[in-house]
Amino acid sequence: MEFYVITFDTDFFKMRAEVIKIDLTLDDIYDELSTLIESDSLEFVDFNNEIVIIIDEQGKSKKGNPVFRIVTEDGITLDLAGKLLFARNIENEFSTDISSIKREDIFNLRLNLDIKLIGMTTGGL
């Protein structure tokens, strides 16, 4: 499964984006994603009907996390802290799952994503 990851590199003081591939079953993916973004609890935030952003639910309360402001395609402003993982939403009859992000999704995000670094967390927000 592939994810588009956006984070902030404090050594170079700039945003960094990359594609990460994880070879696990859907049952194991939660633990691997939690480890990847250093989280005890994941939160899934819809960017649009097809793309979901996976974040650390407690990201704003951890010291030193970047805080990004994203404006979704629907004009909704999101302030999200920590690493941002972009994946695809897969609608099932009773639930919504995630799957690999597609190359064209990454291309569109790179061209059109309205994202700004607005600060760093100090902890205890």
Image (cartoon, rainbow, N blue to C red):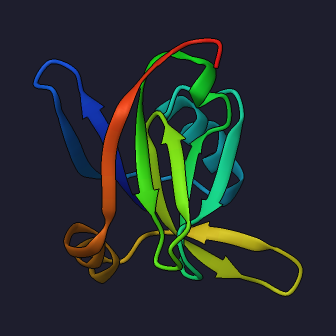
In this rendering, would 7 be left or right of 39?
A: left
The residue at the far left in this view is 12
Identify the residue shown where x is 10% and y is 25%. 12
Number of marks in picture: 0
Identify the residue shown where x is 56% and y is 51%. 54
Instruction: Decide: is 10 above or below 23.
Output: above
Query: Which quarter of the figure has residue 96?
Result: bottom right
Identify the residue shown where x is 52% and y is 43%. 80
Instruction: Decide: is 61 above or below 41.
Output: above
Asked whether the viewer can see residue 22, the reply is: no
The residue at the far right in this view is 94
Instruction: Decide: is 120 above or below 77.
Output: above
User: Where is residue 10 shown, x and y percent of the image?
Assistant: 22, 21
In this rendering, would 62 be left or right of 120?
A: right
Identify the residue shown where x is 64% and y is 20%. 125
Asked whether the viewer can see residue 64, the reply is: yes
Query: Which quarter of the figure has residue 99?
Result: bottom right
User: Where is residue 77 shown, x and y percent of the image?
Assistant: 52, 59
User: Where is residue 124 shown, x and y percent of the image?
Assistant: 65, 12
In this rendering, would 83 be left or right of 114?
A: right
Query: Which quarter of the figure has residue 104?
Result: bottom left
Instruction: Decide: is 95 above or below 3.
Output: below
User: Where is residue 43 shown, x and y percent of the image?
Assistant: 68, 47
